[in-house]
């Protein structure tokens, strides 16, 4: 079978080994960690910025959209094909071009795996701060596209707070550089605009990131509660004391039992909730803050407070937390993870509401929060073999998102909008707001060929979570 | 939506169709539906790390299996290529948060490939000769070993390798020929049927699983194992009628042959009551511990005996680390590093035992090897069947090994030993040794009391 003209052009733009076009290969690019949508017309793996430029030009010539893809670990369908197009995979653009420890920065290609970057500089006492739970597989490019967070977002911010500059290929094939190797370059903050744009404004081909110093001391605490409300009230109480822990996570009893069965990290399975709290910094300060936090936890009826005694114990607690979604995957045939944000002071109220939603739709919902910054991950358990359950899941998820917005929060904290929540954007943005976003998109992406069908509402389905309707494998 | 979204449609069709037609052992819904396609396995997968494509990732391979079950993908050249290229190292199982038993799935997929797919003639013939006509038959294997030994010792092998003869043969015969294990003298086969008494007071009685090729090419490792065990107060029984463990057959999808081998071993080791059945080969140990899986869907009457057998199997490092503390090792001044065999680390989940033993050797500096959880490319006969990928993995491994500055490179599986030896043979740096952990322990373990006592 001879390759079609599009494929021949892509091969000329890159190399024979860089292009997938056979049916049996394209099948594997219809999904990411969210779901399966459509197959691309081709997948191409460039190895340099120049190849990306040539690929973009081929795509433009053929009038085909371009969908960038890192490791495909995203949870909003950003790397899936919404309509048609060419998937540009960055798994082979994974070089760390320059590591400049003296100036605490590194220049990397988008396909570098998040944790590999930290591992490469950890011996010297540095790390890359954004730590999404998928960090052992997800790429820095994907983190930039989705503006990923993680448990340590509370103290260190999200990806955008750690990106200094970008090299970006625009749809016309021009290569532009934003930001700099240092903070605060004059002019518009285009780096800030591009981070989190989910591949709809440009294709990032190089990223200059800030490296952070590993802290001198770390304390990891597990506070155990018999009542969920005591745990949620502790969260606001800790920050009210002027302490910002590096991480402040909450898991409810239902989630804990699944996590413990999967990881054996030592979480108590008989409790109603735990807070996983991490304090980092200078040794003396860490000790003092730890004592204050322990006192606050006790004031709020924590049954027990444990400290990780070793780096191994600490790593195990975090492994449990970071594998939590997967752990829940063991106990029900399917789950749907949501990603909403509320002010952390309203956590108790939100949990009550979640319980109502559970009852209303007859679904079990596990609760995992990046509690410190009010980022919720309700996990709705279901069995997709039952279509009526799918429908209920979709409605329950939407109810939760609406509530987040009502409370002054957002429909996504870190997973991105993608194809999942673009139709929910009007909940957050007025028509004028959305028009502004559209105008910006048109400046960068006038042809609309960059990752179409993501972020902004298409208007095809009104105000719905699209995902459950589009599971199509 | 997350989880199972990719395989939720109409699972009853597959689940309810069980049991499948006689002898069919395809991947089962109850196992593959656990995969939530989160992708956390990707960077743990050696082939994905090299190629960067979904088809050669664990998530992608499971997805392909599901599509085959659903009839969306044929059992054709592409599918077989991607499933074949899997090392079955099972690093993805360690990475997986959802507890997907990938090894079980890929082994099932391969049994279906054996049933449905006709390989090219030469490949079929070679597989049949090696896996079905040679390995299961100790006498033929030994005869072949004698021939190979004569060839190696006559200097002919060196002459052939030095000549350009193999370079003109298609394929990668030249590279592959260099991987042939060196036949040792004497073979360990003479030991089969013997019982070796404990030195000093007998504390345990164990049975040694000696392997098949290991008897010929790793006789020294087997002897070292016996010495270390007897010095620790073990009487070592070496059952006569034992044979190949069948790991390569399970990995190749030849489940019927594997079952016959398993039955022979279960019978051979059923005779004497022992505290443990010891193996020094991680690849063998993994399958020995999983014999019950072979009798889940076929030959159910063997399931219980298999469970009894498997419950007693221990890797030699696992056993030594667990018995009463008696590790009075002689000091050894050296810098060493340890490469985890995949089938010890990922399949058997034994990580600490070898490290504990090595840490007990005074003076030995153990440098942790970065990416030790990534396969070295040996993977049974993978370095022969998939030589190019194996070579790429070996190069990456050697770079990490070089970083450690170690003089002694330790591992705990014959296949890994061969591969790493090939690695240092190509290397510019000289004076490095590749050893099995138990060989090093043999060097530093003292004999208890006076001379060996007979019981």
Image (cartoon, coloured by chain):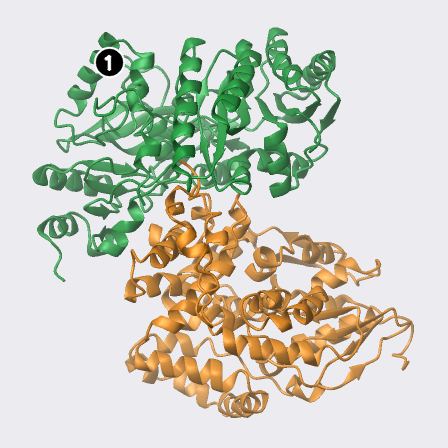
Chain colours: A green, B orange
Estimate the x, y position of residue A384 in percent, counting from the top left. 42, 39
The quarter in which the C terminus of chain A is drawn is top left
The quarter in which the N terminus of chain A is drawn is bottom left
Alpha-carbon neighbours of circle 1 within 10 Å: few (<14), some, or many (≥20)? some
Quadrant assignment, res B189: bottom right
Which residue is depicted at the point 63% across and 41% down?
A261
Mark 1 residue element: helix
Near-viewer residue (A54 or B86): B86
Which residue is depicted at the point 71% across and 68% down?
B308
Whether residue A369 is visible here, answered yes or no, is yes
Taking A123 as reference, is A149 left or right? left
Chain containing mark 1: A
Whether residue A192 is visible here, answered yes or no, is no
Q: In this view, does A374 lie above or below B167?
A: above
Estimate the x, y position of residue B222 in percent, counting from the top left. 68, 76
Estimate the x, y position of residue B366 in percent, counting from the top left. 66, 53
């Amino acid at each position: 079978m001879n390759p079609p003209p599009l494929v021949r052009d892509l091969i000329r733009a890159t190399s024979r080994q860089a292009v997938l076009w056979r049916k049996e290969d394209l099948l594997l690019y219809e999904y990411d960690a969210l779901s399966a949508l459509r197959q691309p017309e081709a997948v191409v793996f460039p190895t340099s910025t120049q190849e990306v430029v040539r690929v973009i030009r081929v795509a433009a010539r053929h009038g085909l959209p371009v969908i960038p893809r890192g490791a495909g670990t995203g949870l909003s369908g950003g790397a899936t094909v919404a309509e048609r197009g060419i998937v540009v995979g960055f798994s082979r653009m994974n070089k760390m071009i320059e590591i400049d420890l003296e100036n605490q920065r590194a220049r990397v290609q988008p396909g570098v795996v998040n944790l590999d970057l930290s591992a490469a500089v950890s011996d010297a006492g540095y790390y890359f701060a954004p730590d999404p739970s998928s960090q052992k597989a997800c790429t820095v490019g994907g983190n930039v596209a989705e503006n990923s967070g993680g448990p340590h977002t509370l103290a260190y911010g999200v990806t955008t707070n750690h990106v200094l500059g970008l090299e970006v290929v625009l749809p016309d094939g021009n290569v532009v550089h934003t930001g700099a190797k240092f903070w605060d370059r004059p002019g518009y903050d285009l780096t800030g605009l591009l981070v989190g744009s989910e591949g709809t404004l440009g294709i990032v081909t190089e990223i200059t990131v800030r490296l952070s110093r590993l802290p001198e001391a770390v304390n990891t605490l597990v506070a155990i509660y018999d009542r969920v409300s005591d745990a949620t009230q502790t969260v606001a109480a800790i920050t009210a004391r002027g302490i910002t822990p590096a991480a402040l996570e909450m898991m409810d009893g239902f989630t804990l039992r699944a996590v413990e069965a999967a990881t054996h990290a030592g979480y108590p399975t008989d409790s109603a909730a735990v807070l996983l709290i991490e304090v980092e910094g200078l040794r003396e300060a860490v000790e003092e803050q730890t004592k204050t936090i322990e006192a606050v936890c006790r004031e709020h009826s924590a049954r027990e407070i444990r400290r990780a005694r070793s780096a191994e114990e600490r790593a195990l607690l975090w492994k449990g937390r970071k594998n939590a979604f997967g752990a829940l995957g063991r106990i029900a045939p399917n789950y749907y993870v949501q990603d909403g944000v509320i002010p952390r002071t309203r956590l108790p109220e939100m949990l009550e509401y979640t319980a109502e939603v559970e009852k209303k739709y007859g679904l079990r919902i596990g609760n995992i929060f990046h509690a410190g910054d009010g980022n919720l991950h309700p996990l709705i358990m279901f069995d997709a073999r039952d279509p009526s359950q799918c429908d209920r899941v979709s409605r329950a998820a939407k109810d939760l998102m609406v509530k987040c917005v009502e409370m002054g929060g957002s429909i996504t904290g870190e997973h991105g909008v993608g194809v999942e929540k673009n139709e929910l954007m009007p909940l957050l943005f007025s028509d004028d707001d959305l028009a502004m976003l559209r105008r910006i998109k048109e400046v960068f992406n006038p042809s609309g060929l960059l990752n179409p069908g993501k972020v902004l509402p298409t208007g095809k389905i009104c105000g719905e979570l699209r995902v459950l309707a589009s599971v199509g494998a | 939506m997350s989880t199972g979204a990719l395989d939720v449609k109409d699972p009853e069709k597959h689940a309810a169709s069980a049991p499948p037609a006689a002898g069919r052992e395809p991947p089962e819904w109850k196992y593959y539906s656990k995969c939530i396609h989160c992708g956390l396995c990707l960077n743990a997968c050696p082939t994905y790390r090299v190629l960067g494509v979904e088809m050669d990732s664990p998530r992608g391979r499971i997805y392909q299996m599901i599509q085959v079950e659903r009839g969306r993908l044929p059992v054709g050249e592409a599918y077989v290529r991607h499933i074949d290229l899997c090392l079955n190292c099972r690093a993805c199982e360690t990475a997986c948060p959802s507890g997907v038993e990938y090894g079980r799935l890929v082994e099932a997929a391969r049994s279906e490939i054996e049933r449905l797919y006709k390989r090219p003639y030469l490949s079929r013939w070679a597989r049949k000769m090696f896996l079905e006509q040679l390995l299961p038959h100790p006498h033929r294997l030994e005869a072949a070993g004698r021939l190979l030994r004569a060839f190696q010792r006559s200097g002919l092998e060196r002459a052939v390798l030095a000549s350009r003869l193999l370079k003109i043969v298609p394929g990668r015969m030249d590279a592959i020929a260099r991987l042939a294990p060196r036949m040792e003298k004497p073979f360990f086969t003479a030991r089969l049927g013997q019982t070796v008494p404990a030195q000093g007071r007998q504390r345990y009685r164990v049975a040694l699983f000696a392997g098949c090729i290991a008897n010929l090419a790793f006789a020294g490792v087997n002897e070292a194992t016996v010495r270390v065990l007897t010095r620790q107060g073990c009487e070592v029984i070496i059952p006569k009628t034992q044979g190949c463990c069948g790991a390569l057959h399970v990995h190749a999808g030849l489940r019927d042959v594997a079952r016959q081998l398993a039955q022979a071993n279960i019978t051979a080791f059923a005779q004497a009551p022992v505290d443990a059945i010891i193996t020094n080969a991680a690849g063998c140990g993994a399958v020995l511990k999983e014999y019950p899986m072979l009798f889940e869907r076929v030959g159910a009457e063997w399931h219980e005996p298999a469970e009894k057998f498997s419950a007693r199997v221990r890797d030699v490092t696992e056993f030594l680390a667990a018995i009463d503390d008696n590790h009075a090792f002689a000091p050894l001044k050296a810098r060493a590093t340890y490469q985890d065999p995949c089938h010890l680390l990922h399949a058997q989940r034994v990580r600490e035992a070898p490290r504990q033993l090595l840490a007990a050797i005074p003076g030995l500096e153990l440098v942790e090897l970065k990416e030790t959880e990534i396969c070295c490319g040996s993977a049974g006969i993978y370095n022969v069947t998939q030589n190019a990928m194996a070579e790429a993995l070996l190069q990456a491994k050697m770079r990490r090994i070089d970083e450690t500055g170690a003089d002694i490179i330790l591992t705990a599986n014959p296949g890994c030993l061969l591969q790493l030896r090939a690695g240092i043979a190509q290397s510019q740096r000289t004076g490095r040794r590749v050893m099995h952990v138990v060989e090093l322990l043999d060097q530093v373990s003292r004999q208890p009391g006076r001379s060996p006592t007979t019981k």
